[in-house]
Image: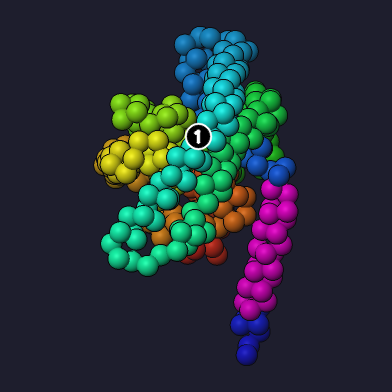
Amino acid sequence: MNQSDQRLGSNIILSAAAFVIVIAGIKSSASILIPFLLAIFIAMLSAPLMTWLTRHRVPQVLSLLLILVGFLLIGTLLASFIGRTITAFYQDMPLYESKLQALVDQSVLWVQARGIDMSDNVLREYVNPGAVMKMVANIFNGLGGVLANTFLILFTVIFILLEASGFPDKLRKAFGDNTDATKHFARFSKLVQKYLVIKTAVSVMTGATIGVALAIIGVDYAAMWALVAFLLNYIPNIGSMIAAVPAVLIAVIQLGVGEALITATVYVVANTFYGNIVEPKMMGRTLGLSTLVVFLSLVFWGWVLGPVGMLLSIPLTMIVKIALEVNERTRWVATLLDQ
């Protein structure tokens, strides 16, 4: 083996070791990083609005104040709504458990009536009403837990927006006027902002459609399921399927199998229309990522950062892709991530 091959092998080993160390550090500090990552991407989502306000001669401080008031108003309304919904659900939980138990008993009798020998306890071992209701309650509690760091995230967003206008000048001072850092930062900001704005618009349409349809069907907590559909629509590929589970389950318990099938159909139609027709037309080639890379990034960032990592998997992967494109030695990796 010649010296150049040895150097290449050493570089690969060192790069792999550095990658493992960095990922381990990110995973171990996830509880600290998650609020700041959310703040960064909320700030990027808010930046176009602030730019629009300042372009229309609204002072920067007043623009920031208007955005802050908007965040506080939305946060207060969400906290109040989620709190009331959690309280109401816990009050209704015994009723849902009894209905689910009756549904299980009916299913056992239906199976036995068709000559299939099934013990009364077999189905109950697999369908535990208490555990099922606890799963749905955990979804509500998870939404409430997101609001726990609201003020930390909010203040971080404020400081990021205050610093955003002067950040390109700081990059030029740090790396010189001829640096490409400002160009790469501007490209990344533009791509992520476009992605977040379009994804948010599609998620709002998806959640609103599902909420209205479930209200017409008569499913309890239709507004909450609309909020869940809106939030989980940020998760590629599997988010819409996860969002459908609690709503369909409640529809089965509350209304019956027929209405539950209609509820499931609503989710399939809404997510197919908005996810496969509307979003691709609006998005174009903004992502520049292959379908396989999107799925793998979802799994990877979900493992590293949990549910928030799944929500932010696409923007985080876009950051990595742009960083790889900058260096000639790693540009081939970025090419492999392309569509």
Which amino acid type is shown beneath numbered disc 1? Leu
Q: Which residues are magenta?
A: 8-30
Work out which quarter of the rendered image holds the N terminus and state it. Answer: bottom right
Q: Residue furthest bottom?
A: 1
Q: Secondary structure at mark 1?
A: helix
Magenta residues, dominant SS class: helix
Q: What residue is drawn where x is 51% and y is 41%?
A: 97
Position in image of residue 18 (x %, y %): 69, 64
Tell me, yes or no, whether the highlighted magenta stretch contains residue 260: no
Q: Nearer the viewer, residue 48 or 6?
A: 48
Position of 102 compared to 168: left or right? left
Q: What residue is drawn where x is 41% and y is 40%?
A: 253
Position in image of residue 185 (x %, y %): 55, 40
Q: What residue is drawn where x is 57% and y is 16%?
A: 73
Position in image of residue 279 (x %, y %): 32, 39
Tell me, yes or no, whether the highlighted magenta stretch contains residue 29: yes
In the image, residue 186 above or below residue 72: below
Identify the residue under disc 1: 95
Q: What residue is drawn where x is 34% and y is 61%?
A: 112
Q: Nearer the viewer, residue 226 or 135?
A: 135
Total numbered labels: 1
